[in-house]
Each structure stands twice: as structure tokens, then as C-alpha cells.
Amino acid sequence: MKAPIISSITAAALYGFLFTACDSPQEDAQEEAMEQKAESLEKDAEAVRKDAEAAAEANEQAAENIRKQADNATDMGKEDAEARADATEDNADAIRKEAEDKADALEDEADATRDAK
């Protein structure tokens, strides 16, 4: 008589576990939405890096052009041009750093979104 009771209790516990272990359609939809948000944040991070790199390269090209134009200038003009070129290159470095920080923050947010599932 104990065997049917034990198997009934075991079966009931197993069925209860199986039904509670399954995600509801709402939970699945919520997880999918969170995954899409995380992917969107990662794409945003990639776009930030790409745009910043293009802007930084444009600044570096501008600095190079300033230096080329300074070749024909007087000594005072060369010093001024060199200072402007250095400032332009510093700006390019700042653009890269700011973009990297922003992209890292977006990726951290994406990771946090995934962890919240």
C-alpha cells in the first residue's frame, strides 16, 4: 500500500515541477524583448565607435593638412600651425576616448539587460 502512495506523491511532485519550470508566453515575450533591447544597445555601441573613428580620422587628416600648409609659412606661422595641428590631434584622441567610454557604458547596459532575464 505504501508503494502507490509514494509513486503518487513522486508523480505529483514531478508534474508540479515540470509545469512550473516552463516559461509562460508572457515570460518568453519579456525575455525576447530584453534580448532585443540588449542587441540594440550593442549595435548602438558599435555605431558610436564607428562614427567616432570616422570623426577622429577626419581630425587627424585636418591636422596633417595644417602641417602641409605650414611648410610654406614663416617660422611664426609654422609654430602656430603646429600648435593648431597638435590641438586637432588631441581632439581626435578625446573623441576616441569619449566614444569608447560611451560604447563601454552601452555594452555594460546590454549585459545588465541580459542578466535581468
Image (cartoon, rainbow, N blue to C red):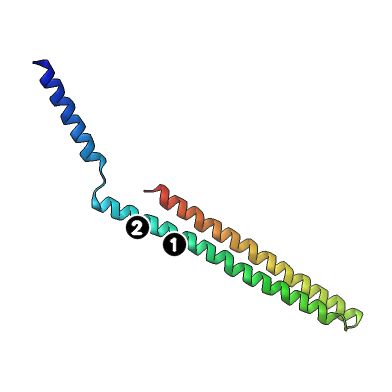
Toward the viewer: 65 or 106? 65
- Disc 1 vs disc 2: Cβ atoms closer than 8 Å? no
* Residue at figure coordinates x 69%, y 73% from the top left: 59
Image coordinates for residue 97, horizontal then vertical, percent: 64, 61
Q: Is 19 on the left or on the right of 70, as rendered?
A: left
Q: Residues within 10 Å of mark 2 (few under 14, many from 20)?
A: some
How far apart are labels 1 and 2 at the CA level?
Answer: 10 Å
* Residue at figure coordinates x 41%, y 50% from the top left: 114
Q: Quadrant of residue 102?
A: bottom right
Image coordinates for residue 104, horizontal then vertical, percent: 55, 56
Residue type, mark 2 in image: Ala
Q: Is 8 on the left or on the right of 79, as rendered?
A: left
Q: Which residue is mark 1?
A: 40
Give the position of the N terminus as an image quadrant: top left
What label sits on residue 99 in the rendered view?
Answer: none
Q: Is 14 on the left or on the right of 107, as rendered?
A: left
Q: Which residue is mark 2?
A: 33
Q: Quadrant of residue 73?
A: bottom right
Circle 2 — which element? helix
Q: Is 13 on the left or on the right of 35, as rendered?
A: left
Give the answer, above or below, for where 9 lies relative to 55.
above
Residue type, mark 1 in image: Ser
Give the answer, above or below, for where 56 lies relative to 5.
below
Circle 1 — which element? helix
Q: Residues within 10 Å of mark 1 (few under 14, many from 20)?
A: some
* Residue at figure coordinates x 55%, y 66% from the top left: 48
Toward the viewer: 13 or 105? 13
